[in-house]
Image: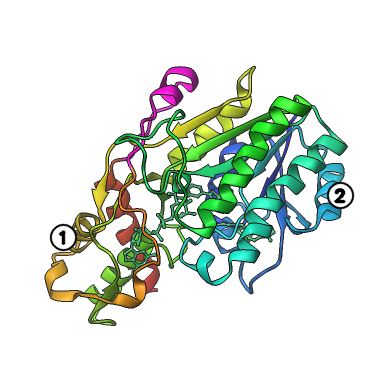
């Protein structure tokens, strides 16, 4: 008997990789489709699974659509990955971000509580909640200090997940995931912006790359590895919260150098610092400690930053050559 899973944010980076993982494990995969763009299915298509997932119209801000999605899918596992996930935009759209990322998560928790309180729930929490870091290496015990409307909204969703576990007994887990990237990353995020520009410069279509704070440091991993941790969390007898990270941090500058060097170019020749890309409040450094996930879930990252960035540059070179 196959299991049913429902994924909000199925058209996003993580939704696509998680769908592939669950399909490979024999799940029937349902996804909430918000129909927000003209070609939202491109990631599922790139992974060759567009026709294998079942899409249900709905929106995180519409509780009735979530109740319907739970009823139609009969999901035993619900992964809440849907979000306005770009930190920069959250200063321009703070209310929408709060509604989708904060209240939206509560809507999914309510739908689970109402339709099938035995279903297991995963919340896509984030290292952005650590913001102005309160410990050199962040783990599940580190106090939060969000620095963006996005971080604030995600913190609401995070505590709601803990609260539904403690007050309603839901099997609700939160994955505090540090930055994870892939060839399916949205082009607004810095790694993909860089790899796309590097490929474009190499092919003679672009001359410069404009960036903001390249001294910021992030703990970057591969999305394909991180979705395995999500699934493992829902297979545990007890719901819990886990940091998922590599335990290494790198500056945006050094990440860029990896990308340029891969095609025989240098950052100095092509990168221009543009104040427009600086943020009103920055998260200067993130560095996660994934010891709990390693010990309890048996999870460990498999892909190095060099492997990740070169994989992304190669994918962008292939796309641009077509
Ligand atoms: P993503 O590529 O931006 O995908 C976001 C998804 O949410 C898309 O499918 C989008 O649909 C959907 N969505 C947006 N607004 C919605 C709404 N109102 N109702 C229903 N769906 C909506 O993000 P990602 O990188 O895959 O990240 C997945 C989740 O993990 C997000 O919650 C993100 O905040 C969180 N997270 C990500 C990282 C990371 O480094 N990637 C780290 C920690 C946490 P459209 O395609 O229609 O826009
Ligand atoms: N996007 C972007 N564009 N970022 C830039 C640029 C630029 O031109 N120049 C410098 N940066 C810096 C940002 O200021 C930030 O310090 C860092 O690069 C990473 O930015 P993003 O790639 O946009 O990611 P993020 O860390 O803000 O947020 C991502 O990771 C979070 C987990 O920590 C997103 O995926 C969030 O959804 C996720 O929760």
Quadrant for ligand 2 reads bottom left
Horizontal side, residue 263 vs residue 114: left or right: left
Q: Which residue is mark 2?
A: 68
Give the crowd class for mark 2: few <14, some 14-19, many >=20 residues within 10 Å. some
Q: Quadrant of residue 106 in the image?
A: top right
Which type of secondary structure does the marked residue at label 2 adopt?
helix
The foreground one among 83 and 318 is 83
Query: Which residue is at a point 36% across and 59% down the rendered structure image?
Result: 282
Looking at the rendering, the stretch of residues picked out in magenta corresponds to: 287-303
Query: Which residue is at a point 64% across and 17% down the rendered structure image?
Result: 237
The foreground one among 30 and 108 is 108
Query: Which residue is at a point 66% across and 36% down the rendered structure image?
Result: 161
92 in relation to 126, above or below:
below
The foreground one among 315 and 227 is 227
Give the crowd class for mark 1: few <14, some 14-19, many >=20 residues within 10 Å. few
The numbered mark at residue 261 is 1
């Amino acid at each position: 008997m196959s299991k049913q899973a429902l994924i909000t944010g199925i058209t996003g980076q993580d939704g696509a990789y998680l769908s592939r993982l669950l399909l490979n494990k024999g799940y029937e995969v349902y996804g909430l489709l918000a129909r927000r763009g003209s070609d939202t299915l491109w990631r599922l298509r790139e992974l060759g699974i567009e026709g294998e997932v079942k899409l249900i119209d709905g929106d995180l801000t519409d509780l009735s659509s979530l109740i319907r999605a739970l009823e139609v899918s009969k999901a035993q596992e619900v992964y809440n990955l849907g979000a306005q996930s770009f930190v920069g935009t959250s200063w321009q759209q703070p209310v929408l971000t709060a509604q989708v990322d904060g209240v939206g998560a509560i809507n999914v928790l309510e739908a689970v509580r109402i339709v099938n309180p035995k279903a297991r729930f995963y919340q896509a929490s984030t290292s952005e909640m650590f913001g102005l870091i309160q410990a050199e290496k962040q783990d599940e015990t580190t106090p939060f200090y969000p620095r963006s409307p996005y971080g604030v909204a995600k913190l609401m969703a995070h505590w709601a997940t803990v609260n539904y576990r403690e007050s309603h007994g839901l099997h609700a887990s939160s994955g505090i995931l540090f930055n994870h990237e892939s060839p399916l990353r949205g082009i607004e995020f810095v790694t993909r912006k860089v790899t796309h520009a590097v490929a474009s410069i190499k092919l003679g279509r672009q001359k410069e790359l404009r960036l903001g704070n390249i001294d910021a440091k992030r703990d970057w991993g591969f999305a394909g590895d991180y979705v395995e941790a999500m699934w493992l969390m829902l297979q545990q007898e007890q719901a819990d919260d886990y940091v998922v990270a590599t335990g290494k941090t790198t500056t945006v500058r050094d990440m860029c150098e990896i990308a340029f060097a891969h095609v025989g170019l240098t950052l100095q020749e092509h990168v221009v610092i543009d104040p427009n890309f600086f943020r009103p409040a920055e998260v200067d450094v993130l560095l996660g400690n994934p010891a709990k996930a390693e010990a309890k879930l048996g999870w460990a990252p498999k892909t190095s930053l060099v492997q990740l960035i070169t994989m992304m540059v190669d994918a962008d070179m292939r796309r641009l050559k077509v």
